[in-house]
Amino acid sequence: MHLLYLDDSGAAGNTTEQYLVLGGVSVFEAQAHWITQELDRLAENINPGDPHSVEFHASETFARRSQPWRGLSQDDARGTIKSVLDVLANAYDSARAFACVVHKASFPNRDPMEIAFEDLCSRFDRYLRRLRANGDTQRGLLILDKSTYETTLQQMSVEFRTLGTSWGVIRNLADTPLFVDSRASRVIQLADHVAHAVFRRYQSGDTQYFDRIARKFDSEDGIIHGLAHKELGNPHCMCIACLSRRTGEGRQPED
C-alpha cells in the first residue's frame, strides 16, 4: 500500500500569513520503517538518553523556544531541519513529496484547508492511477496529524469517493483517512517538515529548506504534479509548480 502522510503549516485564521500549506510525503508501506529508523538516529544525536522523547517539529525547532531546541544555535537549529529533510531527499525514488499552497486572500469565502485537502486527494489519486497503469495495483491511504479538521476531512473524503472532487471521483484510496498523534509517528514528523519547507518558500521567500527536497515532488514528463500553487491574479508566477505547468501546457507535440 502507498501511504501519503500529511501535515499543515500556517493557520487559516492567522491574518499575518498569506498562505496555508498542506504537504507531506508518499511512501510505500515498507519505507515508513526505514524513515522511522533514520529519524530515530537523528533523535539519538539530540537526546542520547531518551531519543523517543524528541519530536521533530519544524516550526518549534526553527523558533528555539522550547526544549530540546532552546539550547541550539540558529545554525544548529537550521541544520537539524535540513537533516530531517535530507531523509526524504536520500530516500528511494518511490518516495514522493506532495504539497498544496493556498493563497488565502484569493479564496476569501472558502476554507483554505479544505481547498488543499481536495487538491491533494485528487493529486494522490492520479499518482496512484498512473502507477496502476504501469502495473502497480496497490491502493493508497491518507494519514494526517490529528487536528480540529478531523471530522470535516473524514466527511470530505467520503464525498470524494461517491460524489467526486472538482476533478472527478476518487477511485484508488483504500479507506477514509487515518488521524494519528504526530508524537507517535516519525513519518508525520517528516511530513511536517515538508509542509514547513514549502511554507517558508512561499511565505518568506526562504528557499534553503525547499531546495533540499524540490526534486522529490511527484513529476512526469517535466511537469511537477505533486506541488500546487493556488493563487489568483498571478499568471506569471515563476515557482517550479507554476512554471513547469505552463511549460507543459505550451509544449507542442513532435512531428
Image (spheres, helix red, strand yellow):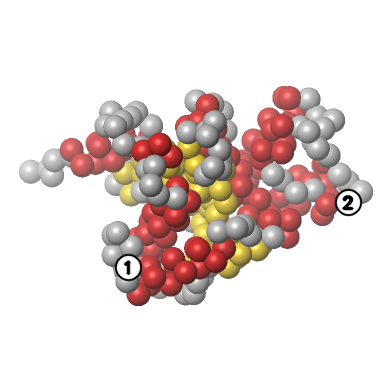
Closest to the observer, 94 or 168: 168
Q: CA distance from mark 2 to mark 1?
A: 46 Å
Question: In x, y percent, where is residue 129?
Answer: 34, 65
Task: Say which residue appears at 63% left-offset and 59% top-offset.
Answer: 146
- Quarter where residue 6 is shown: bottom right
Task: Say which residue appears at 73% left-offset and 60% top-offset.
Answer: 184
Residue 50 is tagged as 2
Residue 159 vertical position relative to residue 74 in the rendered view, above or below = below
Residue 164 is tagged as 1
Asked whether disc 2 touches disc 1, contact meaning CB atoms under 8 Å apart, the reply is no
Q: Secondary structure at mark 1?
A: loop
Point out the frontmost of discs 2 and 1: 1
Q: Amino acid at mark 1?
A: Gly
Closest to the observer, 74 or 254: 74
Q: Amino acid at mark 2?
A: Asp
Task: Say which residue appears at 82% left-offset and 47% top-offset.
Answer: 44
90 sits to left or right of 58 = left
Closest to the observer, 44 or 16: 16
Task: Say which residue appears at 40% left-offset and 49% top-offset.
Answer: 110
- Crowding at mark 2 (Cα within 10 Å: few <14, some 14-19, many 20+): few
